[in-house]
């Protein structure tokens, strides 16, 4: 059966202001760089269905769409109606959960990721506020906090033996990520389309709810409603190693399926440049975080991820944070024993197994923290919230701490304080880590081997590529670079970096004015092993730092870091940044 193809179209952007919350973390430190003023501009998006097949049927009853294309009509009728609109992604049907699949072969995995069934689903309501839970930085956690964390995980692991069907058990919790990310769930009403919570605007809200219930389950297991999940503070040099609490072999927080070279004092390589210089790794990390949080972001969906609605193909495009440091940590931690029993880079290095490593949840706690910083702290002209009903009403199912199956919506988790938690305040050294300006004009003198992008598209990244791309306007324009139709083999780890007018070819150094941004992908399963997405990188600061205001064109250099031969880029262009309406 032909599948419905839907595209998501920008309707409008408009700023909206409101007062900041009066709730303050109990352990706020005066040295941190946060401000509590909030910018909550809104970004509105709609997903419009496109006519894709012919049919003799008449108009569609929209009620059937909302019921997952059931009733007397069926999917063919919807496909025939070009005026129909895509709906928010619905919560999966657990009774139809199938096998998760090996990302490389497509074969069913020998582990079953499907959750236990429940008699009923409850629309979740936040419990009455009691006390703000403050998530601590893992490398600063007190002995008491670590002891509680270890005991909670120990009891969660014990459930795997005493009651394997208890949805609060360690493997049951790990399997949540597997099922939502490796093809066990189809989209409701679209049996040929995976439900995938990565590489789209579902990424942040799904993982926020996931950690919310995980944290509450841990607290329930040790009878401590104040328990707070630590975060791996990899955006600060003091936290740029695997937190020691995870590296004790006799601890329930330990996972043997980690790269043995990345233990102890090894500095995390968020950018996968593989530099051997620890100081350069730190500089690269800070530069990349500054880029994905500020420098390369033009719109809310640049940061949050591209729109993803009912009937659309999964993986429309990751946001800058998911695409960058989030993926870098996953790959750095996961084992590289590709010829042994962990050939798929388990545990952290693959979506299906990532939840088996306790470090996963603390890593994602920091990913969630970066979302709060982006929304609450950063003073930029970028709209911060998405108001599309297709985003706000996207649904997920989780088991809560009382083993009740509950339904939640993406729009109900915008403010972490309303969910009863916040983060310890830590310095943000990346906040002012803008690369230094070029001492001289960055005029590319040797471009004899560079051709216009239009003349060589599509481009395979089996080697470094240099192409000439016209600017959309002369002068110090507010522009963005769009890399479109990025086709990848989803079974591979993919990483490439982008530079503008780069002559130095110092490929291990990202702390340079020419660095524009990156793309990364963790291995995951899709129906046909082929992924297709896009990214946008804002160039305004880059232009200022390399002084190209008088130029009509720039040279775009794309440096493959991993498996470039499995990447093809179908479109490269520079366009104006979307205007902000007042």
Image (spheres, rainbow, N blue to C red):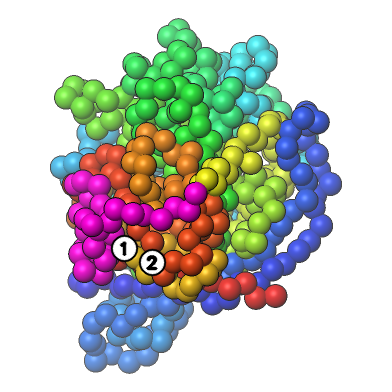
Numbered range of the magenta stretch: 440-468
What number is the disc on residue 468?
1
Give the image location of residue 92, x and y in percent. 41, 55
Q: Nearer the viewer, residue 44 or 82?
A: 44
Q: Are dots 1 and 2 in contact, CB under 8 Å?
A: yes
Give the image location of residue 522, x and y in percent. 33, 41
- Tag 2 residue: 553
Give the image location of residue 211, x and y in percent. 55, 38
Residue occupying the point 76% across, 64% down: 17
**Is residue 455 visible from the viewing direction of this image?**
yes
Residue occupying the point 36% across, 42% down: 504
Question: Is the N terminus in the top left, top right, bottom left or bottom right quadrant?
Answer: bottom left
N-term-proximal mark, 1 vs 2: 1
Horizontal side of 106 relative to 409 (left or right) equals: left
Q: Gap in Å between the C-alphas at discs 1 and 2?
A: 7 Å
Q: Nearer the viewer, residue 87 or 11?
A: 11
- At label 1, counting other C-alpha atoms closer than 10 Å, the crowd grade (few under 14, some 14-19, many 20 or more) is many
What number is the disc on residue 352?
none
User: Magenta stretch: residue 452 in it?
Assistant: yes
Residue occupying the point 30% across, 73% down: 4
Residue occupying the point 37% across, 22% down: 276
Horizontal side of 492 relative to 222 (left or right) equals: left
Per the image, label 2 sits on a secondary structure element best described as strand
Q: Nearer the viewer, residue 107 or 282?
A: 282
Instruction: Tell me the quarter of the picture where residue 494 sits.
Output: top left
**Is residue 193 visible from the viewing direction of this image?**
no
Instruction: Tell me the quarter of the picture where residue 50 sits.
Output: bottom left
Is 296 above or below relative to 9? above
Horizontal side of 20 relative to 484 (left or right) equals: right
């Amino acid at each position: 059966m032909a599948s419905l193809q839907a595209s998501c179209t920008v309707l409008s952007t408009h700023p909206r202001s409101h007062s900041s919350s009066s709730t303050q973390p109990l352990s706020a430190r005066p040295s941190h760089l946060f401000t509590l003023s909030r910018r909550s501009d809104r970004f509105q998006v709609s997903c419009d269905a496109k006519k894709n097949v012919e049919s003799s049927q008449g108009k569609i009853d929209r009620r059937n769409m909302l019921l997952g294309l059931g009733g007397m009509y069926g999917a063919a009728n919807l496909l025939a109606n070009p005026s129909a609109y895509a709906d928010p992604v619905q919560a999966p049907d657990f009774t139809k959960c199938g096998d998760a699949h090996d990302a490389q072969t497509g074969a069913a995995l020998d582990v079953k990721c499907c959750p236990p069934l429940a008699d009923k689903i409850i629309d979740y309501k936040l419990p009455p506020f009691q006390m703000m839970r403050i998530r601590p930085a893992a490398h600063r956690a007190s002995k008491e906090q670590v002891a509680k964390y270890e005991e909670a995980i120990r009891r969660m692991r014990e459930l795997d033996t005493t009651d394997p069907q208890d949805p609060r058990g360690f493997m049951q919790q790990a399997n949540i990520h597997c099922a939502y990310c490796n093809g066990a769930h189809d989209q409701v009403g679209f049996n040929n389309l995976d439900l995938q919570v990565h590489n789209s605007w579902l990424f942040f809200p799904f993982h926020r709810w996931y950690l919310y219930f995980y944290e509450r389950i841990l607290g329930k297991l040790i009878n401590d409603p104040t328990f707070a999940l630590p975060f791996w503070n990899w955006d600060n040099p003091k936290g740029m190693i695997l937190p020691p609490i995870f590296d004790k072999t006799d601890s329930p927080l330990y996972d043997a399926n980690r790269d043995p070279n990345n233990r102890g004092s090894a500095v995390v390589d968020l950018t996968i440049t593989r530099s051997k210089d620890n100081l350069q790794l730190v500089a690269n990390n800070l530069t990349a975080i500054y880029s994905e949080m500020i420098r390369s972001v033009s719109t809310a969906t640049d940061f949050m991820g591209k729109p993803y609605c009912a009937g659309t193909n999964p993986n429309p495009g990751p946001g800058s944070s998911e695409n960058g440091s989030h993926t870098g940590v996953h790959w750095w931690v996961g084992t590289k024993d590709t010829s042994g029993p962990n050939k798929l880079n388990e545990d952290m290095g693959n979506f299906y197994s990532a939840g088996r490593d306790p470090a996963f949840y603390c890593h994602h706690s920091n990913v969630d923290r970066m979302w709060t910083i982006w929304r609450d702290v950063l003073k930029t002209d970028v709209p911060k919230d998405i108001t599309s009903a297709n985003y706000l009403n996207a649904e997920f199912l989780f088991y809560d701490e009382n083993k009740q199956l509950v339904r939640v919506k993406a729009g109900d988790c915008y403010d972490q304080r309303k969910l009863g938690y916040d983060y310890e305040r830590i310095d943000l050294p990346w906040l002012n880590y803008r690369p230094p300006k070029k001492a001289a004009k960055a005029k590319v003198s040797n471009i004899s081997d560079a051709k216009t992008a239009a003349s060589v598209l599509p481009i395979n990244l089996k080697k470094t590529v240099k192409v000439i791309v016209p600017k959309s306007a002369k002068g110090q324009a507010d522009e963005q670079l769009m890399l479109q139709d990025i086709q990848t083999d989803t079974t591979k780890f993919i990483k490439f970096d982008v530079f503008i007018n780069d002559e130095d070819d110092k490929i291990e150094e990202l702390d340079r004015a020419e660095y524009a941004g990156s793309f990364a992908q963790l291995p995951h399963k899709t129906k046909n092993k082929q992924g297709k997405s896009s990214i946008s990188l804002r160039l305004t600061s880059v232009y200022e730092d390399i002084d190209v205001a008088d130029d009509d064109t720039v040279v775009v250099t794309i440096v493959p870091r991993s498996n470039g031969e499995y990447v093809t880029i179908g479109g490269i262009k520079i366009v104006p940044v979307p205007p902000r309406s007042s």
